[in-house]
Image (cartoon, rainbow, N blue to C red):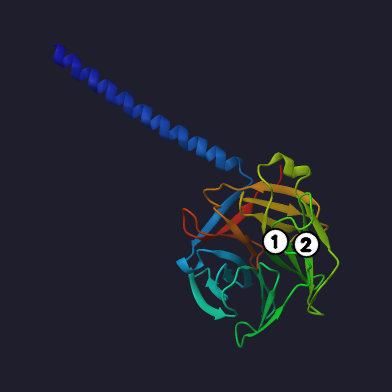
Amino acid sequence: MSMRILEIVVIILGLAGIVAFSFSNKFEKQIHEQVKESREYSVEKMWVLPEILEEVSGINFFANDKLAAVQDEDGIIFIYDLAKGEIEREIDFGGNGDYEAISIKEKDAFILRSDGVIFEVKDFLSSPQVTTYEPEIEHSVNFEGLCLSKKADKFLLLTKDEDVKNGVKNVYSFNLKSKQFEKDIPYKLETEKGIFKDYKGSFRPSEIEINPKTGEFYVLDAKHPRLLILNSTFQVLRLITFDEDEFEQPEGIGFDTEGRLYISNEAGDSDANILQVELKPVK
């Protein structure tokens, strides 16, 4: 009789454990879904990049489903086909260096090195010819971002570290008509005031791009994965925090021909990747 009771107890405890495990999994799944729902964005697609792009530092679309990418160490433009999910071609433009961003204007590619030197690769897809332009800046500056302002016919360059004081980061400009760096500072980014006070860590820009649909500036922070959105006069509109498990080190921004947003991440615990991201409207 006692053995029978013991068997029943074991069965009841086993069933209770199964129910508890099932409830726990269901609860965790609900919490995960609630967290995802509360985010200000959703990841729509992901492309895992090959090892040669594990330090991908900049991306820029030049055709439907095709983008140009650079990485930190090698002077190579990588042509990546999103439809095929593979590198289609490699174009040499320079030696080893700390390359941070790439921007395309018509048939020409422009690559930014961290010391501010711009590499112009004319007719980069057919018969590339390279010209370099050096900034005339008296102090050392660590550049990270480059974007094309079609309206002004200029490139805008953004620094990562303070090059003035009190958290102010200058935005420099390169005139595409004169092919010269301009002395005037068109914008300044103050990263220790306003919205930044509510977030951890200093804001260290890793890339800048202009949304072709809205004209807004999009600025990434790679150290504390975030996306800063500013209006056309560089006034802060929104600061979005990314999940660090998904965005290990966001370094590149691109918009395709339909205006969809893409963000590239350097490798960390996971492989380097490109994510198609949709931002949710402000409630």
Q: Quadrant of the N terminus?
A: top left
Q: Residue at x 66, y 42 (%)?
A: 200
Determine whether 207 is above or below 193 in the image. Answer: below
Q: Residue at x 78, y 44 (%)?
A: 193
| Secondary structure found at label 1 | strand
**Whole-number angstrom distance, CA of label 1 to CA of label 2:** 10 Å
Residue where numbered disc 1 is placed = 208
Horizontal side of 136 relative to 101 (left or right) equals right
Where is residue 127, by image quadrant? bottom right
Number of labels in the image equals: 2
Front-lying residue, 6 or 235? 235
Residue 66: percent from the left, percent from the top?
57, 72
The answer to whether any part of residue 211 appears in the image is: no
Quadrant, the C terminus: top right
Hey, what amino acid is under mark 1?
Answer: Ile
Lower sequence index among marks 1 and 2: 2
**Spot occupied by residue 190 in the image (x, y as percentages of width and height):** 78, 51
Q: Is residue 240 visible?
A: yes
Give how far across and how far down residue 216 sits, in percent. Answer: 76, 58
Q: On the image, which quarter does residue 177 sit in?
A: bottom right
- Where is mark 2, residue-wise? 171
Q: Nearer the viewer, residue 283 or 243?
A: 243
* Circle 2 SS class: strand
